[in-house]
Image (tube, rainbow, N blue to C red):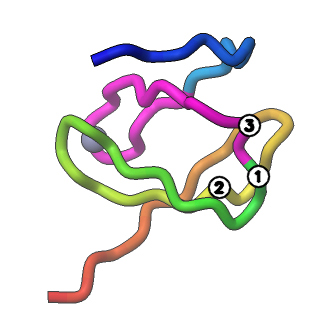
Amino acid sequence: MKAKNMGIKQKNICPECDSVITLYKEPKIGDILECHVCGAESEVIQSNPLELSPLEEEK
Ligand SMILES: [Zn+2]
């Protein structure tokens, strides 16, 4: 699996499991990021500095 380096070095931390989620594009407010470790989805609520709010899954 190749990961292109788009010049984005910013990383964020999963609010659920504290794993680092690598960003492949510039995060924007309202974007939904999915943690590859625990599968939790988080919404970008602030982009500079990056801040995430965990989304509650509907089950
Ligand atoms: Zn996680």
Distance from disc 3 to disc 2, alpha carbons, whole Å, reads: 11 Å
Q: Is residue 57 above or below residue 4?
A: below
Disc 2 marks which residue? 44
Q: Residue at x 24, y 87 (%)?
A: 58
45 left or right of 48 in image: left
Span highlighted in magenta in the image: 12-27
Q: Earlier in the sequence, mark 3 or mark 2?
A: 3
Helix, strand or loop at disc 3?
Answer: loop
In the rendered image, residue 24, in percent from the top left (x then y), is placed at 57, 30
Main SS of the magenta part reads loop
At a point 85% along the width and 37% down the height, the residue shown is 48
Other-residue count near label 3 (Cα within 10 Å), few / some / many at <14 / 14–19 / ≥20: few
- For badge 3, the amino acid type reads Glu
Using residue 42 as the reference point, say whether residue 47 is left or right of it.
right
Instruction: Report the Cα–Cα distance between label 1 and label 2.
Output: 7 Å
Element assignment for label 1: loop
Circle 1 sits on which residue?
28
- Farthest bottom residue in view: 59
Residue at 67 percent across and 20 percent down: it is 10
Q: Nearer the viewer, residue 35 or 15?
A: 35
Residue 52 part of the magenta-drawn span: no
Q: Are marks 3 and 1 in contact (CB under 8 Å)?
A: yes
Q: Quadrant of the N terminus?
A: top left
